[in-house]
Image (cartoon, helix red, strand yellow):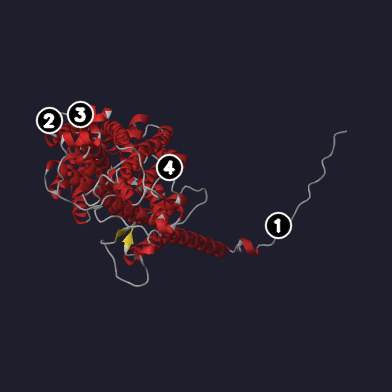
Amino acid sequence: MRSVQEGVGRRSDRGEVASPAEDSERGVGDCPLGTVFMSDEGPPAMISLGIAVSVLAVIGIGLLVSRKVDGDSVNFLVAGRSLGLPLVAAGLMGQAVDSNATLGNTDLAGSVGFWAGASLPLGLGLCLLLTGIFFAKPMNRMKLLTLPDFYKIKYGRGVELAASILMIFSFCILLAGNLVAGGYLFERFLGIPYTAGVLLIVAIVLTYNVTGGMFSDAYTALAQTVITVIGSLALLIWVGSTYGIDIPDGMGPFDLGQLSNTSEGAAINWATLIALGIGDIVAIDFMQRIFSARSPEIARRACFASAAGTAVVGIPYALVALATTDIVDPDGGPRLLALLDEHAPAGLAILVLSAVVAASCSTANGAILGTAAVATRNIAGRTERTDTAGRDTLLRDVRITMIPVAAVAIFFAVQVPQTGILLTLAFDLMLAGLIVPFVAAHLPRRVTTAAAVAAMVAGLGVRLLLFVLTPTMYGVPNTVLYLNNSLIGPGFDGWPTFLGFLASLIAFLATHAAGRLRARAATGIPPASVLPPAPVSTPEPVKQPG
C-alpha cells in the first residue's frame, strides 16, 4: 500500500535560495528560459514584488468590473445569465485548476507516482466532460440561482436543506485547501507566518468578490487562466531543458500498475478519479458558472473547453514532480514551492507562483460566493426582494454571509493544513450523498423524495463510518477523525469511496422499487411479475382494392 511522504502538507522553515553560481553549475544558465528569467536583483525581493504585482492586477480587474452588478442579486450571483463562451470556460477551468490540483498534484506525484497526482486534475477534467455531455444544457435551461434550487424543485424543501448543508460543509473544506496553498506560499516567499498568509489570501479574495460577485469572478478567472496555462507550460519546458524528463521506474504515466495493482495504490487512484470525476458534478461553483452562461449551448461547449484546459495544465505539474524527485528534498515542504524557491530562476518562479496564487484566488472566490449564496438562499430561505429603500435584500444578505463562510474555511485551513487530500475528501462525501439523487432526477421516470432521502442517508452513513474506521485516507494517515480498531487496516484505503456510492445507489433503487410496489398495491394493480400475459392479437388481413 502506498504512503505519502511525511513532508506532504507539513509547514517548514523557508529554505535558502540558490545563488546564480549554483544555478549555473546545475545548468540553469545554459537553458534559454533560465537566461530569460534570471535577473541581477536578489531573487527573494524580486519574487515578492512579482507576486504583489500579480495580486494587485487581479484585484484591479475584479474591482473594475464590479460595477456591472448594479445592485441586482441575479447579476451578483450568476452575472445576469449573460456570460459568453470565453468567460464561462475560464471560470470553469479556474475552479478546476486550483492549488489542490497544482501543489497537491506535485506532492502526490513526486512521492507516489504520476497517477496519484494527476488523478486530481484529470478527475476534475472528467467531471467537466461528463457535465458537458449530460447536464450542462438542461441545468442552464432551468434558470436557477443555486444548485440546491434543483433539489428543491425535484424533491422538496427537506432534501434541499440536507443537500445545502452537505454542500456547504464540503465547500468549506475545498476552500480551506486553497487557503492552505496561500499560507504555504506566503510563509515561504514573503516570510510571514502561515496563519497570517491564510488570512491574507482571504482578504485578497474578499476585496473584489464582495463587490463584484460572479462578474468579478469571471473576468479575474480569465486573466488567472492565462497566467496558469503559461506558467505550467513554462515550468515544464524549463525542467525538461535543464534536468530532462527522467521519470523513476514504476512511477510514470505508462506504469499502469498504479491503476491495476492495489499494492501500488490502484484503489486510491481510482477512488480519487471517481470522487472528483463524478462527485464534482454536483459542485456548487461549477454549476453556478453553468447557470451564468448566456445559452445552454455555450454552457455545454464551455465544459468541453475547460475539461481540455484542465488536463493541459494539470499534467505538466505531475511530470515536473517526477522529473525532479532527486532534486527536491521530500522533507522540505510542498515540492513545487521547494523547487521554485531553491532551484528555479527568479523570473520563472514569479510566473509559476503567480499562477498558484491565481489558482488559489480563482477557486476561493468561487467557493466563497457559491457557499454564501447557498447558505443565504437555501438554508436561511432568503429570496429576491427589495426593502423600503429599493435595495435588493438577497444581494445584501449574500455579501454579509461571505464573512462567516470565509471564517469557517480559515478554521479548517489552520487545523488541517493539507491540500490535495482535502479536495478529494470533500467530493468523496458529495459522491456518497448527492450524486445518485441528482442523476436520477434527470431521468424521464418520476422518482420519489423517499428514494432521494434513503440514498443520502445510506451513502453518507456508510462513507463516514468507514472514514472513522480507516487509519489512512488517500495514502495519508487519518489524523482528522480515526477510531483505533483491528477490523480495518491501511490496505482498505480507497475502497470506502466505492462502498459509500454503492450504498447510496442500492438504497435509492430499493426505496424506489418499494414505493412503486406500494403504489400498485394501493391502486389494486398487481406487480408486473404476477400480471397475466397480455393477449396476442392477430391483425386482420389487409383487403386489396378491387
Up the image or down, 108 lies above or below 463; here it is above
Question: For the residues carrying marks 1 and 4, which lies nearer the camera in this image?
Answer: 4
In which quadrant will I find the C terminus?
top right
Q: Residues within 10 Å of mark 2 (few under 14, many from 20)?
A: few
Q: Earlier in the sequence, mark 1 or mark 3?
A: 3
Marks 2 and 3 sit apart, C-alpha to C-alpha, by 32 Å
Q: Secondary structure at mark 3?
A: helix
Q: Quadrant of residue 383?
A: top left
The amino acid beneath tag 1 is Ala
Q: Earlier in the sequence, mark 2 or mark 4?
A: 2
- Residue at the extreme bottom: 486
State the residue position of label 2. 41
Question: For the residues carrying marks 2 and 4, which lies nearer the camera in this image?
Answer: 2
State the residue position of label 3. 64
Q: Secondary structure at mark 4?
A: helix
Give the residue at x 66% y 62%: 531
Where is residue 288? Give x, y as percent: 33, 41
Q: Earlier in the sequence, mark 2 or mark 3?
A: 2
Which residue occupies the foreground of this view, 183 or 216?
A: 183
The amino acid beneath tag 2 is Glu
Which residue occupies the foreground of this view, 130 or 414?
A: 414
Question: For the residues carrying marks 2 and 1, which lies nearer the camera in this image?
Answer: 2
State the residue position of label 1. 534
Whether label 4 touches label 3, CB < 8 Å: no
Q: Secondary structure at mark 1?
A: loop
Q: Quadrant of residue 101?
A: top left
Where is residue 43? Give x, y as percent: 14, 35
Q: Earlier in the sequence, mark 1 or mark 4?
A: 4
